Amino acid sequence: MLDDTLLDDPAALQRADHDRALLALAGAGARVRTALRQADAAGLDRLRPDGRPRAVLVAGHGSALTAAEILAALAGSATLIAPLPPTEAAAPRADRAGAPPAFTAGLGWQLPGWAGPLDLLVVSSAAGGEQGLIGLAEQAYARGCAVVVTAPPGSPLAEAALQVRALPLPYVGTVLPDEDPTAAPAAEPDLPAEDPAALWSHLTPLLALAQKLGLTQLPYDALPAVADLLDTAAVRCRPDAAAYTNPAKGLAARLAGTVPLLWAEGPVAGAAAARFAAQLADRAGRPALAGALPQVLTAHRGMFTGQLGAGADPDDFFRDRVEEPDPLHLQVLLLRHLPGTDGPEAAPEQDGPVEVTEDDERPRSFGVRRAHRLAAAHDVRLTEYASTLADPLHALADLIALTDFAAVYLGLAAAQS
């Protein structure tokens, strides 16, 4: 069981945070600003596209694919946005120094058969050493696709971008100190945890490019405002803020000892829920199931009728449970985007997502009402968070900032328990 008093011990959190995850999230706003500045310096501000591509293919792994899903949620149906995950893996070769290579260095990608001169391929990598991405860029160039590459300057992928006449955009990496040398060695050194703020280094140049191409209807100042919003969230969710004033710590404590079901209403909240599930697995070591209303109600119905959804223990009530571990129960977290619907007791916009109470008077769709009834019928706790920011990108950043910090806090507190 999680000892939630650890969440109010900044020193203990710092000792547990060997890879500086909290510092990385605190610097997410600065990464957005740096990525925008470097993208303009690389030539993005001088780009004059002839029109929109038929399809935008975004290749990468980890947060690069999450960025593609976010772009798809923001772009709607005007243009096809297709994430390209790796389709194969080979044994990677060690570098010249003899260091063990990362598993991702041996991944391979395949361009769809229909891709051609009307399409755009965006390749995004935090390492820039994946030979599979280099081969994919060469394949796209041979087919006449336009190519954009986001990679660390000087990396093999960035150098290959010049060979295929791609637009090279720099990937903004972390500037934090190295990991704590006293930390225990990683159990799977070739499968390291991803930088929790890497999403913004992938997403910022991708959205800036999308604005230039007319793929989204975002205001011209939407991305700089995201940086300010992330800075505000970092202050609100800082480690020395008490759990009762820190919404991320409160959410982490609420999810401890549960199997989270992350439900979402709408594409913006859906992208945030999928991101939260990935972060819970990577940062907290917790399984979570994400899905969008209304189809998630039928997909997850069996969870409620099984053992995890039971509100009461069917076994002998009087038996001694002192030596038994706490049972796992379901916990539903419902994420929503409610633009311009601040209730009378809602927190101001700078306070982040609002926790929507059961007696909230704002209108609810039938799917949301049915979700509440399903949870109540099986004694499962349902917590609802909504962002009331009008801009969908800002609402998404609002939800992701909260849930990213919550995933890191849950992992750090569990490691110290």
Image (cartoon, rainbow, N blue to C red):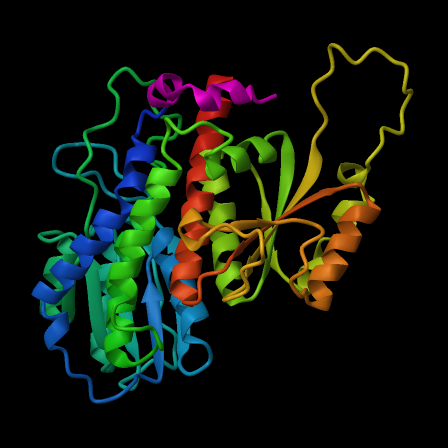
Q: Is residue 218 visible?
A: yes
The correct choice, above or below, for 17 with respect to 378 in the image is above
Q: Position of residue 395 (x, y in %)?
A: 44, 60
Q: Seen from this angle, which residue lies furthest bottom?
A: 50
Q: Judge by depth and name the residue closer to the eye, 60 or 339.
A: 339
* Residue 73 horizontal/vertical position (percent): 45, 68
In percent of width and height, residue 285 lies at: 50, 33
Q: Residue at x 18, y 30 (%)?
A: 177
408 to the left or right of 345: left
In the foreground, 239 or 143: 239
Q: Determine which quarter of the picture holds residue 227.
A: bottom left
Is residue 3 covered in magenta?
A: yes
| Count of residue discs | 0
Q: Dividing the picture into quarters, in which one does residue 344 lie?
A: bottom right
The residue nearer to you, when weighing 361 against 268, is 361
Which one is nearer the viewer's eye here, 251 or 338? 338
Q: Is residue 311 magenta?
A: no
| Residue drawn at (12%, 59%) of the image | 38
Please report the bounds of the magenta region as a residue range: 1-16
Q: Which residue is depicted at the point 46% across and 18% down? A: 416
Q: Main secondary structure of the magenta part?
A: helix
Q: Quadrant of the N terminus?
A: top right
Residue 165 in sight from this viewpoint: no
The percent position of residue 225, horizontal first and vertical second, equals: 29, 60
**Left or right placement of residue 14 versus residue 301 in this view:** left
